Amino acid sequence: MPAHGFDYEIAPSGEVVITHHGRRATTLRGERAAEFLAEVEDDPQGVMARWTGNYKRGNERTARQHPRNQGR
């Protein structure tokens, strides 16, 4: 399994299917699929996270400290 859970497959039709922990996260077609394939070689996990919208936004610590998440 990939380090961060992302993987991708290229379908015979040219579509790119990105999965996260084995579940389909998104499907890219046409020009977007070509752009993704050109970019994915540098940092595959980071690129797939960005393309699926599943990446850290910098607010995780703030949310963890919110009173409703304190278990009280």
Image (cartoon, rainbow, N blue to C red):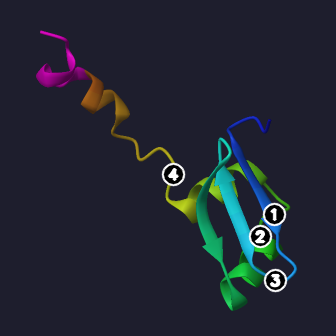
Q: Work out whether mark 3 precedes mark 1 in sequence or the reverse, and give the earlier one.
A: 1
Secondary structure, mark 2, is helix
* Three-letter code, disc 1: Glu
Q: The C terminus appears in which quarter of the rendering?
A: top left
Mark toward the start of the polypeptide (2 vs 3): 3
Closer to the camera in the image, 12 or 62: 12
Residue range in magenta is 65-72
Earlier in the chain: of badge 1 and badge 4, it is 1
Tell me the tag on residue 54: 4
- Between the residue at mark 2 and the residue at mark 4, the CA separation in whole angstroms equals 17 Å
Q: Amino acid at mark 4?
A: Asn
Residue 66 colored magenta? Answer: yes
User: Vertical placement of 26 versus 59: above or below?
Assistant: below
Tell me the kind of residue under disc 3.
Gly
Residue type at the position of mark 2:
Glu
Q: Label 4's element?
A: loop
Which residue is at a point 20% across and 14% down the rendered structure image?
A: 70
> Which numbered marker is on residue 9?
1
**Quadrant location of residue 69?**
top left
